Amino acid sequence: MPDKFDDIAAVIATRDYGAARSWYSRVIGREPDLEPVDGVAEWQITATAWLQLVEDPQRAGKSAVRIGVADLDAQVAELSESGIAAGEPTVIADMVKVVDVSDADGNEVSFVEEVTGH
């Protein structure tokens, strides 16, 4: 594996920072790890992956992020408990199960579980 890069951040643009910050806090299950400047929130998802929420009305609704999970059913249940409706998981190419949800801006957040045996 190349060691050219150290980490990655997925950036989600929003029109309404306060509402989106609340929604992503519910999705992730905790408040942001960092809020370095006004209109920016960051959650550390893994040791080297971050989700960054930015107030940017011009780009709002045009973002998509996929988050890998070990147990998709548990993730869907957690979303439901947080008041976020998710559809039924879809299996893609017998490799992954995916559930998509959308935030208020229409940004797509997908949760992906690898299908065992691959």
Image (tube, helix red, strand yellow):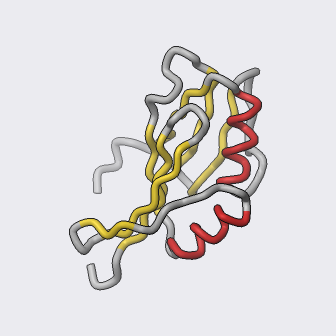
How many marks do you count on the picture? 0
Residue 61, percent across and down?
49, 29
Which residue does the image show at 66% across and 39% down from the upper left? Answer: 42
Q: Is residue 62 above or below residue 92?
A: above
Can you name the residue that lies furthest to the bottom here? 117
Q: Position of residue 104 (x, y in %)?
A: 61, 36
Quarter of the image for the N terminus: give it: bottom left
Q: Please tell me which residue is depicted at 58% across the width and 19% down the height of the picture.
A: 56
Residue 96 position within the rendered picture, expressed as x and y whole percent measured from the top left: 33, 69
Task: Pick the residue in front: 4 or 40.
Answer: 40
Q: Is residue 50 above or below residue 106?
A: below
Q: Residue furthest top?
A: 58
Is the residue 55 above or below the residue 2 in the image? Answer: above
The part of the image, by quadrant, that contains residue 77 is: bottom right
At horizontal 72% and vertical 37% (from top left) the residue drawn is 21
Q: Quadrant of residue 6?
A: top left
Residue at left 50%, top 67%? Answer: 69
Quadrant, the C terminus: bottom left
Q: Residue 108 vs residue 43: left or right? A: left
In-front residue for pair 106/63: 106
Q: Residue furthest left?
A: 93
